[in-house]
Amino acid sequence: MSNIIIDSAFDSGNIDVMTVNEARAMLRLKNDKDSEFKQWFHFRVANCGGRELVLKIVGLNDTAYPAGWPDYNACVSEDRDFWGRAPSTFDKDEEGGTLTIRFAPAGDLAWFAYFAPFSMERHHDLVSISASAEGVEHRKLGETLDGRSLDCLTMGTGDVQTWLYARQHPGESMAEWWMEGALQVLCDPSDTLGRALREKCRFHIVPNCNPDGSARGHLRTNAKGVNLNREWAEPSAERSPEVLAIRNAMDESGVHFAMDVHGDEAIDAVFLAGFEGIPSWSDEQGERFYRYQRILERRCPDFQTAKGYPKSGPGKANLAISTNQVAERYAATAMTLEMPFKDNADHPDEVQGWSPERSRMLARDCLGALLEFLESED
């Protein structure tokens, strides 16, 4: 029988093909450019002929987050619209750590990815559609190293300067699916939640902080191999123009509330990380974050507080990380939202795992919690 054909020469594509034998293939991940990070993959398999594919991605023990592979099922789509999960197994002792993906497509084409991709074309559609809504302004905050625009959408007439930004780590594509859900709420004049929030807040929304890394198929870095979420203390035009542009805009507006949207490779839950350990920490500022967290946990079944990151000790916070820098610099209620690459263990979905659809719905819950948070302050 003829061999399957595997390629990744497209937006966010990433894979190295080592061997192909009929419907079986051995594959390897590529590093982010000029970086040690690797974890993201996105590739197309053609000439499937309805056969069961057996795809082995090897060498995974030295990826950025090897704990992300056990209990992980690869994302798969045949129409690039609905993304399900292909049964996958991980063996740390096979070929330096091997993920074996098995899937029998109905037709001749199947697409595989670490998480459902959010393409640059979809990004441009999202920005354009949102910018055309009444009362929404578009700003180009700056330009990336590859010459792409850093898009910001501004809306609302309230006094609470609210920043929502996503995909500092481009492989965390669930973050822009979350943004799509948030913008649908905030830009729809018939949505009373969005209308109420726009009366209370002035929103500054950056749907994709790292378009270069997104297009290049990176997990975690920009075109220069720089992790943007370690640049917030001293961003530079040479290394991190994306962070420099966003932080400059924050300096102009001030920040009262900020959410930095991410995905986590290993933890099978939705959770928030705060800013414990910043030099100016006060119980009053910390309580604002904890109050928002309690509200979200009560409102959203997908959110929990049992799992998450360890808290930094007094004075030990890394101010190069966005949430810590923003909380310290502006005395803001700042936080990092994390969603799983795997599934939500509390509410599993065998067909899709954590998905674009659930990311969008989570955005509405987060915004509902924000409105309650602001009303309780009033």
Image (cartoon, grey):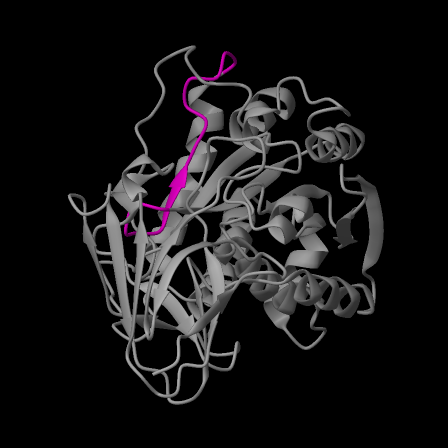
Horizontal and vertical percent position of residue 124: 74, 63
Would you identify the image quadrant in which residue 226 lies?
top right
Query: Is residue 177 shown in magenta?
Result: no
Residue at the outermost front position? 1
Residue 341 left/right relative to 131: left
Residue 348 vs 90, above or below: the answer is below
In terms of depth relative to the viewer, which is nearer, 125 or 315? Answer: 125
Q: How many marks?
A: 0
Which residues make up the magenta segment? 265-280
Is 130 rendered above or below residue 338?
A: below
Residue 177 lies, in percent from the top left, at: 54, 62
Image position of 2 (left or right of 143): left
Occupied quadrant, residue 260: top right
In which quadrant will I find the C terminus? top right
Name the main secondary structure of what is drawn in magenta.
Answer: loop
The quadrant in which residue 332 appears is top right
Q: Nearer the viewer, residue 39 or 191?
A: 39
Residue located 31% across and 81% down the image: 104
The answer to whether residue 323 is above or below residue 283 is below
User: Where residue 183 appears, x then y in whole percent?
Assistant: 65, 63
Look at 49% across and 63% down and name the residue there.
Answer: 43
Pick the front one: 281 or 150: 150
Quarter of the picture holding the N terminus: bottom left
Image location of residue 20, percent across then percent down: 37, 65
